[in-house]
Image (spheres, rainbow, N blue to C red):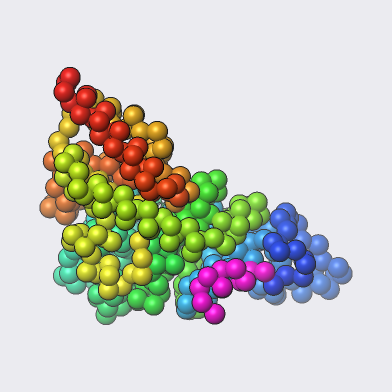
């Protein structure tokens, strides 16, 4: 079956006779007889209902639907946020004395988790330029390579199959934050990734009302990762699973519309004199375009925008004048957003150099012509503020 069909039909095999699964709330699972209770001691805790912590019918339905999206995925693992999925994936791969190599463009809190918390457990972290050959940077103790393509805020592509080859030749795992493309537009496991992470908060749920993380792995890694998630006490509420499952059904339809709108707006922005650069691998002018085209099957609605140098009040006049773009960070919902991009780098020279303000735009499901009209009046406000500055 094709992906759209799988999305509609998977995770609906229950006996509940409804189109959608019920929201099953539970902590305690009752056993019929003493012998059943004793038998539960030897059963796999992840097999069917065992304890609310490990999920109920609603979570199992979402797991099944997510699993059907990622060829090779043994059984999707649910976490209460994208960041929880990131920390669990890393914790499953390392022990004291190990080293992790992380893309210098990774999501800020990923870096904080490595620099502060893994460090406390005796795991060191170093960073790689997202465009570089990592082989010389692998240390004897490197057990995991962490990538995110395109990079958070700065949108650098990475050559995932090359990273996988290098990591595997060294005996390390490749972990990828695949939130931008989602499994819809990038088959991470099929390109050599060992643990693929989704901040389900974004496009999976898709309506800016759920916190969720998801992990996809092949069978041998599923158990160690699932155990870490359970042993750290992570659980996702059935309400959030229900909402995520409802959002997930329209993932393909939404992503196609996000992509179409983002390309239209990004191309329009490229022709504007106020714009220095648009950071979007789907554009042929982007330095990551060739890799994106080779490996990905599409792009979402998130991209970067470098304006020509402008003073802070002039930038504020532009952003504040926008009527259809909310000022907000968590993307992937149906609405358009804009935020200034603030990032740090460790490896000298890895950051693309920006002389003007850097913004991150999320193109929602509005009509792109309305978004363009809004940006156009925003540029008029920017010009007016510049003239009086
Ligand atoms: C690329 C990326 N990964 C992970 C996350 C974390 O997801 P969550 O907010 O669900 O913890 C975010 C959130 O902004 C993100 O942009």
- The magenta stretch spans residue 218: no
Residue 155 position within the rendered picture, expressed as x and y whole percent measured from the top left: 27, 55
Q: Mark yes or no: residue 273 visible.
A: yes
Of 273 and 187, which appears nearest the observer?
Answer: 273
Looking at the image, the residue that sits furthest to the right is 33
Q: Mark yes or no: residue 126 visible.
A: no
| Callout count | 0
Q: Which residue is pictured at 28% across the width and 67% down the height? A: 292
Q: Which residue is pictured at 25% across the width and 31% down the height? A: 380
Residue 125 position within the rendered picture, expressed as x and y whole percent measured from the top left: 28, 57
Of 316 and 60, which appears nearest the observer?
Answer: 316
Q: Quadrant of the C terminus?
A: top left
Q: In the visual, does 139 lie left or right of 224?
A: left
Q: Which residue is pictured at 21% across the width and 63% down the height? A: 284
Q: Quadrant of the N terminus?
A: bottom right
Q: In the visual, does 153 lie left or right of 14?
A: left
Q: In the visual, does 172 lie left or right of 127?
A: right
Residue 122 position within the rendered picture, expressed as x and y whole percent measured from the top left: 34, 57
Q: Tell me the quarter of the picture where residue 106 sits.
A: bottom left
Residue 128 position within the rendered picture, expressed as x and y whole percent measured from the top left: 21, 60
Q: Which residues, given as a range, are shown in magenta?
A: 1-12
Q: Which residue is pictured at 48% across the width and 48% down the height? A: 334
Task: Say above or below: 376 vs 218.
Answer: above
Q: Tell me the quarter of the picture where residue 273 sits.
A: top left
Q: Tell me the quarter of the picture where residue 227 sits.
A: bottom right
Of 281 and 177, which appears nearest the observer?
Answer: 281
């Amino acid at each position: 079956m094709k992906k759209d069909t799988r999305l509609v039909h998977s995770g609906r095999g229950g006996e509940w006779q409804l189109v959608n699964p019920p929201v099953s709330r539970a902590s305690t699972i009752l056993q019929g007889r003493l012998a059943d209770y004793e038998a539960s001691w030897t059963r796999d805790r992840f097999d069917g209902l065992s304890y609310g912590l490990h999920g109920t019918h609603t979570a199992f339905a979402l797991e099944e639907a997510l699993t059907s999206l990622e060829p090779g995925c043994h059984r999707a693992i649910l976490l209460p946020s994208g960041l929880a999925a990131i920390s669990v994936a890393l914790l499953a791969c390392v022990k004291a004395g190990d080293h992790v190599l992380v893309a210098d463009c990774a999501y800020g809190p990923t870096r904080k988790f490595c620099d502060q918390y893994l460090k406390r457990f005796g795991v060191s972290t170093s960073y790689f330029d997202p465009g570089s050959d990592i082989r010389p940077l692998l240390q004897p103790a490197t057990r995991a390579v962490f990538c995110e393509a395109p990079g958070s805020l700065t949108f650098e592509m990475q050559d995932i199959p090359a990273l996988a080859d290098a990591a595997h030749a060294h005996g390390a795992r490749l972990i990828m934050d695949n939130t931008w493309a989602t499994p819809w537009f990038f088959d991470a496991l099929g390109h050599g990734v060992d643990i693929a992470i989704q901040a389900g908060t974004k496009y999976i749920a898709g309506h800016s009302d759920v916190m969720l993380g998801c992990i996809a792995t092949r069978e041998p890694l599923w158990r160690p990762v699932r155990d870490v998630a359970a042993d750290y006490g992570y659980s996702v509420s059935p309400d959030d699973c229900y909402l995520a499952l409802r959002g997930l059904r329209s993932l393909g339809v939404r992503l196609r519309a996000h992509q179409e709108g983002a390309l239209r707006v990004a191309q329009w922005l490229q022709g504007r004199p106020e714009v220095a650069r648009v950071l979007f691998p789907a554009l042929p002018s982007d330095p990551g375009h060739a890799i994106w085209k080779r490996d990905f099957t599409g792009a979402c609605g998130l991209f970067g925008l470098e304006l020509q140098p402008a003073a802070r009040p002039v930038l504020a006049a532009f952003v504040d004048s926008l009527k259809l773009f909310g000022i907000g960070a968590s993307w992937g919902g149906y609405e358009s957003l804009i935020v200034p991009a603030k990032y740090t780098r460790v490896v000298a020279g890895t950051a693309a150099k920006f002389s003007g303000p850097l913004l991150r735009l999320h193109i929602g499901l509005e009509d792109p012509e309305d978004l363009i009209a809004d940006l156009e009046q925003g540029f008029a406000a920017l010009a007016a503020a510049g003239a009086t500055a």
